[in-house]
Image: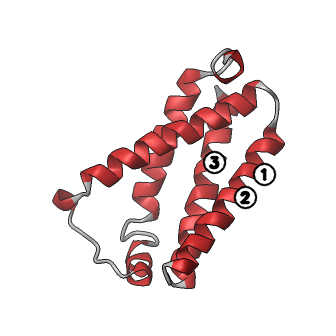
């Protein structure tokens, strides 16, 4: 159990998750990929006051867990593990989009977000 909590930089874990969450807000916003992504997954873009609270809470919990994973591998000096896990996760997310018949654009947008989030988390671990 010590290897998953011992030398982890918890400040970097939390900051990495929060910055990745903010990246998602920008990534899926009308300023970047949001409208075309929404069309590709068959949903309507909502208003700011219609945010899906359950989805947002799940997203932040998932990002905290992912950032913790990055922190554990950083503490163990195992960057390749993070890279391998990120590529595997992005490919699985892409394939899930194929099963749901999401557009190629939407699948690439989702995969790009996950890769971007992990890059942010790795940078935060390196800085802090």
Classify 10 Å Cα crowding around label 3: few (below 14), some (14-19), many (20 and above). many
Q: Is residue 71 left or right of residue 82?
A: left
Distance in Å between CA atoms under marks 1 and 3: 11 Å
- Nearest the viewer among 55 and 113 is 55
Viewer-side label of 3, 2 = 2
Question: Element under label 2?
Answer: helix
Residue sitting at 68 percent across and 40 percent down? Answer: 122
Q: Which residue is mark 2?
A: 87
Question: Element under label 1?
Answer: helix
Please, is residue 113 above or below residue 40 in the view?
above
Q: Which residue is mark 1?
A: 84
Determine the residue located farthest toward the left in the rendered image: 49
Query: Is residue 109 visible in this depiction of the protein?
Result: yes
Classify 10 Å Cα crowding around label 2: few (below 14), some (14-19), many (20 and above). some
Q: Earlier in the sequence, mark 1 or mark 3?
A: 1
Query: Is residue 19 visible in this depiction of the protein?
Result: no
Question: Where residue 78 sits: x, y (%)?
Answer: 82, 35
Q: Check the picture and name the quadrant holding the N terminus.
A: top right
Q: Is residue 93 left or right of residue 61?
A: right
- Nearest the viewer among 109 and 1 is 1
Question: Where residue 74 sits: x, y (%)?
Answer: 74, 30
Residue sitting at 56 percent across and 22 percent down? Answer: 10
């Amino acid at each position: 159990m010590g290897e998953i909590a011992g030398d982890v930089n918890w400040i970097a874990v939390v900051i990495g998750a929060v910055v990745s969450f903010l990246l998602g807000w920008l990534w899926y916003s009308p300023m970047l990929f949001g409208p075309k992504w929404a069309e590709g997954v068959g949903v309507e873009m909502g208003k700011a006051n219609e945010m899906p609270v359950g989805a947002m809470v799940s997203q932040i919990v998932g990002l905290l867990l992912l950032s913790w994973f990055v922190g554990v591998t950083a503490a163990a000096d195992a960057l390749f593990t993070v890279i391998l896990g990120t590529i595997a996760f992005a490919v699985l997310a892409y394939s899930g989009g194929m099963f749901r018949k999401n557009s190629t654009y939407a699948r690439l947008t989702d995969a790009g977000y996950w890769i971007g989030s992990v890059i942010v988390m790795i940078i935060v671990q390196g800085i802090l």
